[in-house]
Image (cartoon, rainbow, N blue to C red):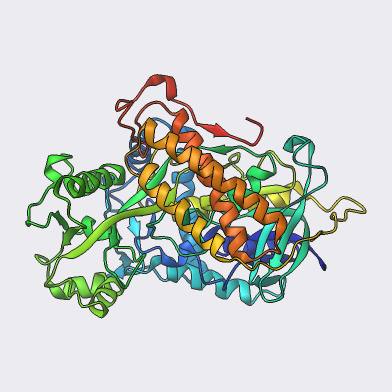
Amino acid sequence: MSTKRFDFLVIGSGVAGLLAAEKLAKAGTVAVITKRAPEISNTNLAQGGIAAVTAVEDNFDLHIADTLRTGAGLSDTEIVKLTVMEGPERVRELVALGTEFSRRKGFFELGLEGGHSRRRILHAADATGREIEHTLLKACRRDKNIKFFPGFAAVDLILRGRPARTRPQKNVCLGVYALEAATGKVHSFLAGSTLLASGGAGKVYRYTTNPDVATGDGMAMAYRAGLRLLNMEFVQFHPTCLYHPQEKSFLISEALRGEGGILRGASGEAFMKKYSPDRELAPRDIVARAIDAELKRTGADCVYLDMTHLSAAFLKKRFPTIHAKCLQLGIDITRQPIPVVPAAHFFCGGVETDRNGRTALPGLYAAGETAHTGLHGANRLASNSLLEACVFSHRAAQAIMADGRSLPRGAAPVPWQTGNARPSDEAVIISHNWDEIRTLMWNYVGIVRSNKRLDRARARVKIISDEIVKYYWDFLLTTDLLELRNIACLAGVIIRSAAGRRESRGLHFTVDYPAASKKFLKPTAADRYH
């Protein structure tokens, strides 16, 4: 086992991790750990854009109101205000770094998405995340203080004490153990400050818009270290993921509905009028449940997003990525409706942090989808995720530098022990449990829930988790095993959180408690001690 020492450690290479790394490099050396290539992230796949007040006909109060309304009573009002008000400065910063947002006659071309009362979505055609990701990667790669470690999977946080016996407030984070996939060796990365920016956990579910790396590693490591995860029951299912046998997770951006797309059933009926006066521009939870209800009512495999009433020239210019991908699969969106289904997309919950990204564990910070800031509440307003990542990675970087933490004198990790672990000769166990967890989470803890479904899911996940723990200690580590361990951990937390919220609010809908209740106007909290 080798030990690598840096001033700062960043886990993840989406916008939250890269923006923080770019800032921290001005104060010291930075290691950026990524499971696969740095380009592979949720940020890179983001199509819609980043919401920020930049137009004269828009204002902070409107954006704040839209966010609070969508959050269904659980958004932290002060966090919403500071996020919205700091958004324009973070946009200017991205532009200064080289991000090229779409413009028309010299002004930002602003999009409209569900839940927004004004056009305020800055975008780069329909590949905004890719533009931001590439801009930040370019900036980080030319900085000599930043070193990337692709192919390293974080295993667990390195703590000065023992997490099973010590509350996080009385502990210190020294860094992280990480598995090098190419060699199978576990290395210690030590730093005075560690930032969790590893993204969400869409792969907990069978159907997701997320890339394969989204297995909630940062959330699971924080949980095992004793930190609280808040509001994990609020999983946002994007209403429109492409339904096609050759493409498992291609997102069909909400921006299409913002530009006039119409959702239709197999018969051609436009059905959203039955579910909301806002129709296709209703918040995502309403649209996703409407599609789910239509699929169950009709028995169809998918619904259709119809753009054919718009000009072909407009569609090709505004949505070049989506047009090209669909055309590659034999779907001409200028002439044919797009087959779509809901899919797990974004976690509104995460690791509890303060307004500056600090966790309860000294030396550990979190930003992006890994963190719970209080912005989203029970449901995320479209395109507020890139905004949140930019605002709070900036704040976390500022807090890290202000805190000025360095490794305690003589700090050294407990050596990684393989014990009697041996190479696995039954990899099928990993793939089987992986499939079973994701399928039962989709069927029992998905868009619509019930006490009976949650009870069944909890019992089965407990059995699988026990099997995984035994497998973890008996066999040598692989990235697949680490990811399975993490999704099993988070599946259990999601089920516990969902069972504890005996109401329906935002993204959490249960047939046993279909109404919202004032008793639950507070975040749901889960940690390993309760």
Residue at the far bottom in the pictured view: 328
On screen, residue 79 versus residue 241, left or right, reads right
Image coordinates for residue 23, horizontal then vertical, percent = 64, 61
Residue 234 falls in image quadrant:
top left
Residue at the far top in the pictured view: 519
On screen, residue 151 versus residue 403, left or right, reads left
**Residue 388 to residue 338: above or below:** above
Residue at the far front in the pictured view: 425
Image coordinates for residue 18, horizontal then vertical, percent = 58, 64
Asked if residue 384 shows in the view, the reply is: no
On screen, residue 248 versus residue 491, left or right, reads left
Image coordinates for residue 176, horizontal then vertical, percent = 73, 57
Residue 417 falls in image quadrant:
bottom right
> Which residue occupies the foreground of this view, 308 or 345?
345
Asked if residue 386 shows in the view, the reply is: yes
**Residue 10 to residue 118: above or below:** below
Residue at 63% in and 72% down: 151
Q: How many marks?
A: 0
**Residue 230 to residue 393: above or below:** above
Which quarter shows the N terminus?
bottom right
> Which residue occupies the foreground of this view, 57 or 22?
22
Which quarter shows the C terminus?
top right
On screen, residue 116 versus residue 164, left or right, reads left
Image coordinates for residue 214, horizontal then vertical, percent = 50, 59
> Which residue occupies the foreground of this view, 71 or 426?
426
Residue at 34% in and 39% down: 70
